[in-house]
Amino acid sequence: MAKRDREAGRGRVRRVLAAVLVVALLAGAGLAWQTGWAEQWWDELRSDAGTPADPAAVAPPPEVDVPPVVVPDALAPAADGTAPLDAAAIRQALAPLDSPDLGRHVIAAVGPLEGTGLSYEAAKGAAVAIPASTTKIVTAAAALFLLGPEHTFATTTVLDTGTPGGVPRLVLVGGGDPFLAREPTAPSSGSATYQPERADVRTLAKRTARALKASGVDTVELGFDDGLFSGPAVHPSWRPEYIPDEVNPVSALWVDEGRALPGQGPVADPALEAATVFAQALARRGITVAGAPARTPTPTGAAEVGRVAGPTVAQIVQRLIEVSDNAAAEVLLRHAGLADQGEGSFAGGRQAVERVLAANGIDPRGSVLYDGSGLSRDNRLAPGVLVDVLRLAASADHPQLRPLLAALPVAGYTGSLTDRMDTGPAAGRGRVRAKTGTLTGVTSLAGIAIDAEGHLLAFALMADKVKKVKGGLARIAMDNAAAGLGACAC
């Protein structure tokens, strides 16, 4: 995306009005990237194209039911984006961070979305904290930077006809599609959260069976290859109770993120489960599978028989940021490691993230991340890093990162913020977009806001010494602080 004229005046007023309007119109709706609505949101926020005289006359996206838009009598003109923000006003807006419910370690950073430096930085205790799921902002940015938003991950089948027993061996090859499903599923129309269209093994079996029959093959041995990823499938710092409630062992080949069907126990081997489901689907298509599926490397030179491709990286990011999908984040971390280090592991992903930050001039400020989801309590992150990553995603020099900002839930309306920010300043609802972060004793928020003066802000708020009994109150205090940025004349 080309750089825009950033001169103060009528163009900036139009940008802010467009931003407020589009956030309101998207309330209660998923931002389906493939329909163009997510990209349109960011283009409207950045462009000088102007807006209609009557914002309420603008039609919402198709099939979206939104409340009436209440247009204020006047919208304050946007301040010069190059002028420094008012640190005192930010401090006042963030007064809820002084709540004792947040515990003894609270840190925060706020700065202009289009700019450099921090307008406000505060730390009660150490300068880094456990980030919880705000880690996903960094993971998503690294994956988008290294892979590009349109990249997809394919699950394939290949056929080896040179097996000693004379029965050809079909191998199911995992390509690291985080959303590979058991069977075709239609996106839910009753949820405000975006649902990408998923590839599935039943469709792959149908395509594979058709190709096998065309070649005169009706009986195969079945192998499966989940060797794309390496290293431990579960991070050693994750608490045992996280499996399978929060995430399953990470695999390059699984169905439904390694989750069992309702009423069944945990899936001990996600790749074997995927291969078993695939074998059953093959049998229904008239292909006999001799013996049980067995883990095997992909034969060199074997011909591809079937293929299904999953959602794009942009669509995966949209989903994982909106609903805080731990499994998808861990898969993307491994793909980042593969792209940058040639190693799809926790360690490879960690090195890839560090290199992406360094390549873009982002000072880690003592931060260290061990996983992609933020489940690790060994992670430490400085809020200024999150601000810098959000700025990078907003930069006209990096349009491939735009899906990250478009994926941030809208306060009070979508994703993990649907039922939040309802007790603080009303201006926060619809004017703040943020990623949540929650673990026992940890609450955090990081995202962007449009303040009452039209400033575009990036912020990160973190607390990781919250008493267990104060968890709900701490979240409210954090929400009130973020909503205060939307109401702030900063």
Image: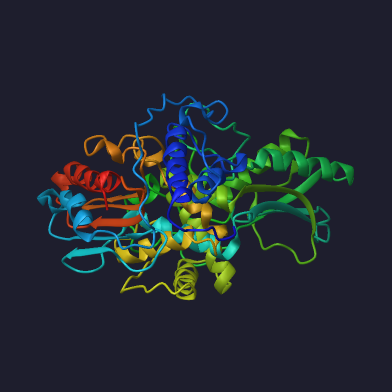
Q: Is residue 280 above or below residue 393?
A: above
- Nearer the observer, 52 or 119: 52
Would residue 47 appear left or right of 490 to someone viewing this image? right
Specify the quadrant of the image occupied by residue 173: bottom right
| Residue sitting farthest toward the front | 9
Measuring from the top left, give residue 153's x and y in whole percent.
63, 54
Would residue 482 appear left or right of 399 to someone viewing this image? left
Q: Residue at x 27, y 56 (%)?
A: 461
Would residue 17 appear left or right of 86 to someone viewing this image? right
Measuring from the top left, give residue 231's x and y in whole percent.
49, 67
Measuring from the top left, give residue 32's x and y in whole percent.
55, 39
Measuring from the top left, give residue 199's x and y in whole percent.
64, 43
Residue 320 visible within the image: no
Q: Residue at x 47, y 44 (%)?
A: 14
Q: Residue at x 46, y 54 (%)?
A: 329
Instruction: Report the quarter where the N terminus lies.
Output: bottom right
Q: Residue at x 50, y 51 (%)?
A: 46
Q: Is residue 356 above or below residue 156?
A: below
Residue 39 visible within the image: yes
